[in-house]
Image (spheres, coloured by chain):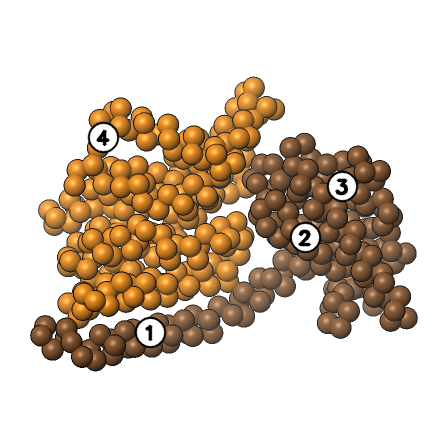
Chain colours: A brown, B orange
Amino acid sequence: MGARKNGFYPVMLLTLIVFISIVALTLTNAVTKDKIELAKKDEIAEMLITLFPKMEGFTYDEKSDLYIPLAEQQPLGYAFMAEKSGYGGAISILVGLEPDTTLRGIRIISQQETPGLGSRIAESFFLQQFPGLAVDDVELTRKGGEVDAITGATISSSAVVEGVRKAILDKLNQLRRET
Amino acid sequence: MHSFTKNFLKGIIRSNPTFILLLGLCPTLAVSTSLDNAVGMAAAFTSVLLASNIIISLIRNYVPIRVRIPVFIVIIATLVTIVDLILQGFIPALSKSLGMYIPLIVVNCIILGRAEAFASKDNTTNSIADALGMGVGFAWAIVLISLIRQLLGTGALDLFGHHLFTVPGLGDNPVTIFLLPMGAFFAIGVLLALFRWMGVSTGE
């Protein structure tokens, strides 16, 4: 062990191990990269279908960041992502709009809210309050809107509501500017 | 094989990583909110620990004392990243609910602790036994904690989307505090006291 204790041996060994780990990670990444992309796309597609059951397919416009669900080549509305910080981290929400820009509905794509409390924002009893609302009604009841907060999860509920309303306003402004 | 059995069994009760060694409490407290998470975390944790113990025991004679910690950390971090990528690609739902706690396995002191205290000093067979024993010990500990938290916190028992049963009377009025971080401390504190009272103590 004498020669191993001094000089360059520890440096060489560490370099070698880092090199091997880089190779291992590159290989794993190559194998899983497409799968991960696919899993993310599948998730959005699945959520889109629950919002637009008649949908036969969808296109994604990168420039405006809009998902456009299609049936017989005709757009059924628009969908886009909204994000807002909740109680336990970012909540990302898929927002669906009718062609006349009333709310088609929302779906929670990911959230880290308290399980059993804030996480109930992803349950249907909360989500079913959204379809048919106009932008200005997307607000908690106590603030004059149409959405009842979940008991014990006001921060999570209000994050969803704020996030959705802001995203819709932003998108409408963006569309107005473009046309 | 005698030492294999002995090294396997010690992780389960006598040197249980959670209840006796009190290692790795951060991920244990954080993800024990539901049974699904506990099972997923235990599986991910055990695979990383097993792989890290095998690799470290194989190279133990070539690693100088002075660089052992960086070597262990690089190996463990690589393994965790591999597990993370595989989960994201193949079981996205589990990867989403375990969230940031998978990357945190890197700094889980049970894994580094076993590398330092066991795998770097013993042969591969014993290190495998140690990893499996610690894995089982961690698994039953986190499953027990999450069982208590889920039962009291939601008043019902669900496993991988299957509703098993609702506790009468508790289903409508669950003790939601058990789902919050403080509930985790209540649960683990009472369990620790219970094990001490039963006379289970460290055997090392």
Residue B6 at what x, y percent from top left?
Answer: 15, 44
| 2 vs 3, front mark | 2
Marks 1,2: beta carbons within 8 A = no
Q: Which of the 4 quarters of the picture holds residue A119? A: top right
Q: Which residue is mark 4?
A: B200
Q: Which residue is mark 1?
A: A18
| 3 vs 1, front mark | 1
Q: Residue at image x 83%, y 40%? A: A145
Q: Residue at image x 41%, y 64%? A: B82
Q: Which residue is mark 3?
A: A128
Amino acid tagged 3:
Gln
Secondary structure under tag 4 reads loop
Q: Chain of mark 3?
A: A
Q: Residue at image x 82%, y 57%? A: A169
Amino acid tagged 4:
Val
Q: Which of the 4 quarters of the picture holds residue B186? A: top left
